[in-house]
Image: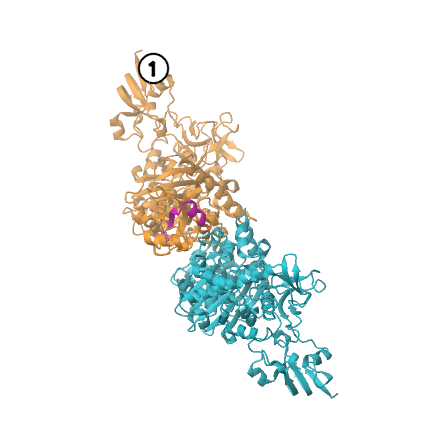
Chain colours: A cyan, B orange
Amino acid sequence: MTTCSVTFTPSDTAVAVPVGTLLNEAAQEAGLDLNMPCGGQGRCGRCAVLVEQGTVRRRSNLRLSAEDVAQGYCLACQTVIEGDARILIPPQEKIERRLVTDRTVAAIEVPLDYDPARDQVLAAYYLELDVPSLDDQTDDWSRVQRALRRNHGVERITADLGVLRTLGRTLRNAAWQVTAIVERGGWDDPAATPRLVDVLPGRQTERLLGAAIDIGTTSNVVYLVDLLSGKVVAEAVDYNGQITRGEDVISRIIYAGKNDGLGELQSLVMQTLNRLLERAVQRVRAQTSDIYRATVAGNSTMIHLFLGLPPESIRLTPFITAANQPPPVRAGVLGLAINPQATVDCLPGVASYVGADITAGVVSTGLDEEDKLTLFLDVGTNGETVVGMREWLLTCACSAGPAFEGAGVEHGMRATTGAIEEVWVHSESYEPTWRVIGNQAPRGLCGSGLITLLAELFITGVIDRSGNLNLSLGTPRVREGEHGAEYVVAWAAESATRSDIVLTKVDIDNLLRAKAAIYAGYTVLCQSVGVDPADVEQVLIGGAFGQYINVEKAVQIGLLPDLPWERFRFLGNTSARGAYLALLGRPARARIAAAAGKMTYLELSADNTFYENFMSALFLPHTEIERFPSVQAALADDHRATGEFVPREEFA
Amino acid sequence: MTTCSVTFTPSDTAVAVPVGTLLNEAAQEAGLDLNMPCGGQGRCGRCAVLVEQGTVRRRSNLRLSAEDVAQGYCLACQTVIEGDARILIPPQEKIERRLVTDRTVAAIEVPLDYDPARDQVLAAYYLELDVPSLDDQTDDWSRVQRALRRNHGVERITADLGVLRTLGRTLRNAAWQVTAIVERGGWDDPAATPRLVDVLPGRQTERLLGAAIDIGTTSNVVYLVDLLSGKVVAEAVDYNGQITRGEDVISRIIYAGKNDGLGELQSLVMQTLNRLLERAVQRVRAQTSDIYRATVAGNSTMIHLFLGLPPESIRLTPFITAANQPPPVRAGVLGLAINPQATVDCLPGVASYVGADITAGVVSTGLDEEDKLTLFLDVGTNGETVVGMREWLLTCACSAGPAFEGAGVEHGMRATTGAIEEVWVHSESYEPTWRVIGNQAPRGLCGSGLITLLAELFITGVIDRSGNLNLSLGTPRVREGEHGAEYVVAWAAESATRSDIVLTKVDIDNLLRAKAAIYAGYTVLCQSVGVDPADVEQVLIGGAFGQYINVEKAVQIGLLPDLPWERFRFLGNTSARGAYLALLGRPARARIAAAAGKMTYLELSADNTFYENFMSALFLPHTEIERFPSVQAALADDHRATGEFVPREEFA
């Protein structure tokens, strides 16, 4: 037996192994841990490593692009060592799930053309005031107005009582040298009377803070932004405190209708946001009262609860909001712990189930200025969908239900520590391998885990096109449970809950309804303008959940349209990014308002074609399988291969 | 002895008395009570009666005009019965002091040219909204906007959160037929975006309530006004609840500087106003939330305390307010218990001691459109004074101190029950007679009582021109007290306090300083524009106190200029009336702002001529007695007569 030496970098760990050893086995021998969620089947592509030097033989290049291969990448589980080699194991972060956690430096880039003097609603003006005397008894407020007029051309200005209440002391303590924070009209009305928001001692014109807020039903995000540079200077994320009062919008609306439920929910989200704001300002040595403007995105229910608007009519036919475009509000009135005189600008929504998160997303993804026919999807409870381009935008919400958020599924859970987020099923043994958030014993399955599990069960033949489980495969994983047939994902001994984690037929039916609703939604939108989902030139997937969807698996279950992978783009929190852009001032804020005005809402509950499309989509991947050619090809390959699988003869 | 029969009407009481009996003696005989504050000296004119029939002989017609005499009026104490007679005793109300009390029907008349459609900032629009359906899912707020646009031409409108929070339920409970209360821009900016203030079920366009508020240091007044008719529909008056924390503005400013003194004072005045508002709306079967606008007048300190603005710089050189022209505020922010979305518009002041009460007074008296050279006086602590006419207005405040309000005087008190409000001193016995508010045993002397007492003591020779008491008159009324010389107004046995009520030399000096300050104030204003106080064509006296001043007595002490009585006009609460006019909308409100802008403030503390004038005015009536010819004449008549006194030989 010929032995050869394999050195793994960057740790520079060397190991001697026989020729013909698989790279992943060599790594294991060297005590190195490679990601291998599909269990070494060569299907997930997660064990990619870079051959820096030496000779190897690739059995399969699945998931690697031609460019990857040219650079020297290979799949560790599919690559045989044929001589001494030097192998780079790339940083695991590239494939590790990003947990819901704070990051000090945000990835958002300032638009190149951002010009605060032109775009920004807020400005900070340094003033050296005349000192009052018996010859100049001008009152404090008029004195500030006079200096703003003379030195900064602010002809007319108003102020809230809160500023005037502290003005006198600030002026005197600062020896009449102060900085005035001025709101120069509304974003939509530069001609409106400016407003004095605050007066600070001395010269404080180096920084001017604002907050972009995204209120998700599950997670809340705060970006702290320096409005002068446009940069995100801190970011904070946490679960929405309302979760304890209901996981989805419908249960929150119901809760809001009880006694002081609305007040309680408003207070809960405010507590969450105020905590996030506090965390964010601490990172940059500021105070929350230094934040002089906030923009807020979120679905219509979240915006209602944030503002204390009763949401009850949102869930009752004909599904009407109190206000799709709420007027600006002072922070102090709401209890949002930024400067009490700061304007809180809630972005406009379109309908009860197409809210400000979607209009913000439309603009932050550039969909409203797009030349390609684009599908924008927020895969979540409400399944908000937009189809369109620069000239037109059509939108709907398709009531997918909370299955993809882990609710309505027996062992479903939110994407938090202990959730299985990815599952691979062996095509012969039907044994699963999975990856758990936080890398610990599993407690249940989150949305992305459910999608991959469903797809894997289907592709490996554990379930048929109707979602029925095949009880005759000879594996204990498929069995009759208390509530019918089920597949055991994790045995009690492996789980953190000390009981089996299963996916039941009932769960599968719920998931099928959810994916069918979303598929039917965008199909109806496309049909209503005479195009086919296959004509879509670009699919933008938004939402915190969206970024973790495995496209291949989502296509295999018929959730996403069967299009080349390069047409899909995952954009993460497009809603928060829209709030950020709106915070930068008039141009983006006006674009969001224009987008909201341009979006035509299609009410699916009043649409027969939606029901027909929904029924057809209740199969895997769809009644008309020809709509999913790649899935058809994968199934043709004996339930074991996807469209891109390389010939089987390369296996040993 | 010839007897004759006298019948008094309207009581139809007959009495038989000897010929030669005085009418007041006959009335007493008949058991009828005549007002006779001067004790029957024929000097006060208060016992005027009408001779309907019969023969009488008038000894004196003092205080009666030629017209009065022609009509048959005579003074009961100066008229001898010469045969059967029929005498009408006019209603006592004509001369009775009006107590601080509520009146259901106010005397204020609606300006003839009031046109709510043109002038009023508020409007009530009836709306019949389209009922929402799956084909028309317009949100509630947009639906209201649409109806306002289509049916009432309101192109653009905003709203506070408070309205939107109740909108949905109101619309649905009212079956989509509602009345929108709309603020059509600001009073100064009709082009500003209108604002939805409230939405009421059904058609409620018959009445639209507003409140005109006057915050006096002592008394607060609320006029409830129907903005559609312009009528005052209810009125309520009460003492300012802050009185317990200091009687004058200076002590309140000091109190405001302690811990939460400011918050406490604001809360106290708000409690008073809220009680008054509640009383007012109850009379017209309305609720305080039906009040959709308030205008507020008051001196600068009162406005600061009302708004919660720290007043501290008002009393410190160089006497600067936080804001002379505070921006409009929402009632809800202040805690004023009208509709929380209602605008509270505080009228503009000119300086620390010339506040909104004076600018409101300037407009409500018509001074700003006057062709005559006019002096407008608010005789109170601050002695606010305006001299001018249509083209120009000059103003000052002359720190009279609180002597005329009863403070700084040993037995001084506010004009409330038990206060001596008028005193007459017998020119030979030096015995006083007085009238007490509430017609009971006296507790002290209020401002008008002090003025008449000082004048009487001077005219009867009890004090000299420097205010020194003459201890050699042989009356126990003048004596050495614990703190120097004093005059006993009421003996312990007569008083409600069971101790002597006295006026001391110290009190007299305080009163002299107060009157000298006011005299010096308007004299400096006149001199600064090259006119003499004697050139003034009209003297307007405002303030609740002003209307009870006895002009003759005020002239005698040198407080008011010595001008013919017909040049004086007592206008009562000119401040409250100004607030009322401002509530009626743009024209008057704009006039008040224009007046505030036009008024040139003269700072007396920086003015040497003020000090010189003040020193010269510390005498009775003045160092240069020729400035007071009528007083000179009265003194020439052996200290017993005024300029109009009839020859003495008519006395028995």
Question: Residue B101: x percent and y percent?
Answer: 42, 34
- The residue depicted at 50 percent of the width and 56 percent of the height is A301
- The residue depicted at 46 percent of the width and 61 percent of the height is A612
- The residue depicted at 38 percent of the width and 45 percent of the height is B579
Is the C terminus of chain B in the top left, top right, bottom left or bottom right quadrant?
top left
* A233 to A606, vertically: above or below: below
Q: How many marks?
A: 1
* B121 to A153, vertically: above or below: above
Name the residue type under label 1: Val
Q: Nearer the viewer, residue A146 or B633?
A: A146
User: Does B183 appear in magenta?
Assistant: yes
In the rendered image, which residue does mark 1 sit on? B15
- Tell me if mark 1 has few (under 14), some (14-19) or many (20+) residues whose alpha carbon lies within 10 angstroms of its own: some
Question: Residue A77: x percent and y percent?
Answer: 66, 79
Q: Residue furthest top?
A: B1
Q: Residue furthest front?
A: A472
| Residue interval drawn in magenta | B168-187
Residue B32 placement: quadrant? top left
